[in-house]
Amino acid sequence: MSRYFTEEHEWVEVEGKVATVGITEYAQEQLGDVVFVDVPAEGKQFDKGDEAAVVESVKAASDVYSPVSGTIVEGNDVLADEPALVNTDPEGDGWFFKLELSDPSELDGLMDEAGYKKFVAGL
Amino acid sequence: MTDFIAEMMERLPDRLLPLDAWHRERGGRMVPFAGYQMPVQYEGVMAEHLWTRENAGLFDVSHMGQVLLTGDAPDVALESVVPGEIQKLGVNRMRYSVLLNDEGGILDDLMVTRRERDLYLVVNGACKYDDLAHMREVFPDEVVITLLDERALFALQGPRAGEALASLIPDVASLYFMQAGAFTFDGMSLWISRSGYTGEDGFEISVDCDHAAQLADRLCALESVKPIGLGARDSLRLEAGLPLYGHDLDETVSPTEGDLAFSISKRRRSEGGFAGAERILEELAEGVDRKRVGLMVEGRQPVREGAELYVGDRMVGKVTSGGFAPTLGAPIAMGLVKAAFIDMGTVLEAEVRGKRIPVTVAPMPFVPHRYHRAKAV
């Protein structure tokens, strides 16, 4: 298993052909209290960079982009009732969706944890 | 996630609040607002909102314009551009009003207090220079307009605000809602009114900039008081059903459309003689084409400013501000809606990202006001 990060503050955890996607600790901190999350339904297909989910905090609405191309195998339905999980456990139980990778080579363009930390420090 | 964070990272404008360092020391996250860098939150909007509803919150609203009108008959001059009764406003009494253009649209909303020697106005930060220019243009030369830009302004709001401020300045206990007076405390000269924009009891306190940190420190040393950011100020005023200028009100919206007919005093209704009176008096008699209403939102997804409101295929209005109401645990909104669809209980649909979300026209305030009013005699 390995974890990748994007400049859009998403994390991608890959196990076999399936990637789990969420937003980072830094992103939830910037967003503030999350009050609503809309996750994609099973079977939806996304290209890398497509709007895949919506996260709304008290302050603002933001899109979550699919960091890689693929087909949704599961959305995290728990977030409908407990959107605050995105604040309390963004890189764990607060995951957004899982998708089956259509082009695993896209992962090569993403950052590793050390690279992301450096990226955030430079913001 | 890019859009939101990019917005937060936008180059900040240069104007700093007198208490800029004070906010940063307390973890305030500064964002651009009304031409200033202002604290949007300290520990989090939700926690700060709920704290203010249960205790007392200190808001730095020094971006707002504090304006003095002196000289010859400033009340008569002001009445030419606001629809409220100003000439008979008692000393140390205040009134909410709106600054009108000749078409009856609202240029700004403001508080007017008659003091012994002047009229003291508090206007919105984003509008203050335009307001000054407009008043200079329409007022006679004998009226002197002074921006008090050496004074800071705080709002102390919440059910424990009265007890908190009286523990430092016992005499403020004598003020009721929309009354004001001069007080001294710890060597500072303060102008304090019992007013605010959260729906709670509370005060607005004007202090010279050199003493602003001293006053803020004394207040925040109290166990019931915490500093509160702009984010919670917005969600509190939304729950209280109070309009935000530039969003719920603008220069096309009349006070009648803005559901602010209460600000048009009885004498002024019969006499007219204020900017835009023709339109506004006609709307009072004949009704309006559209009106600002409250909207309860089904489900959990917030419906925000700009969302279009529909009945079937017909667009009947727009959301002017909306968000999540922490006190209610549900999204709420305000919108300008065509008059045929403003009856309480009318169900409309808001379009959000291509989806239709049912919203119901609802009475405001969403959360009851708890002002410290003088008892009826």
Image: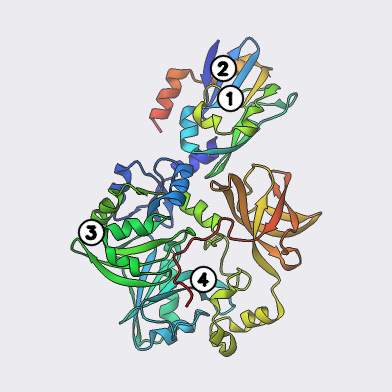
SS at mark 2?
strand
- The correct choice, above or below, for B14 with respect to A109 in the image is below
Alpha-carbon neighbours of circle 2 within 10 Å: few (<14), some, or many (≥20)?
A: some
Q: From the viewer's perspective, is the residue at label 1 or at label 2 nearer?
A: 1
Mark 4 vs mark 3: same chain? yes
Q: Chain of mark 2?
A: A
- The correct choice, above or below, for B184 with respect to B23 in the image is below
Locate residue B70 relative to residue A33 in the image: left or right: left
Query: CB atoms at circles 1 and 4 under 8 Å apart?
Result: no
Q: Chain of mark 3?
A: B
Q: Which residue is mark 2?
A: A13
Alpha-carbon neighbours of circle 1 within 10 Å: few (<14), some, or many (≥20)?
A: many
Q: How many tags in the picture?
A: 4
Q: Which of pointers 4 and 3 lies earlier in the amino acid sequence?
A: 4
Mark 4 vs mark 2: same chain? no
Cα distance, mark 4 to mark 2?
52 Å
SS at mark 4?
strand
Q: Looking at the image, which is closer to me, B274 or B87?
A: B87
Q: Chain of mark 4?
A: B
- The residue under label 4 is which amino acid type? Leu
Q: From the viewer's perspective, is the residue at label 4 or at label 3 nearer?
A: 3
- Give coordinates of residue B246: x percent, y percent: 53, 62
Q: Which of pointers 1 and 2 lies earlier in the amino acid sequence?
A: 2
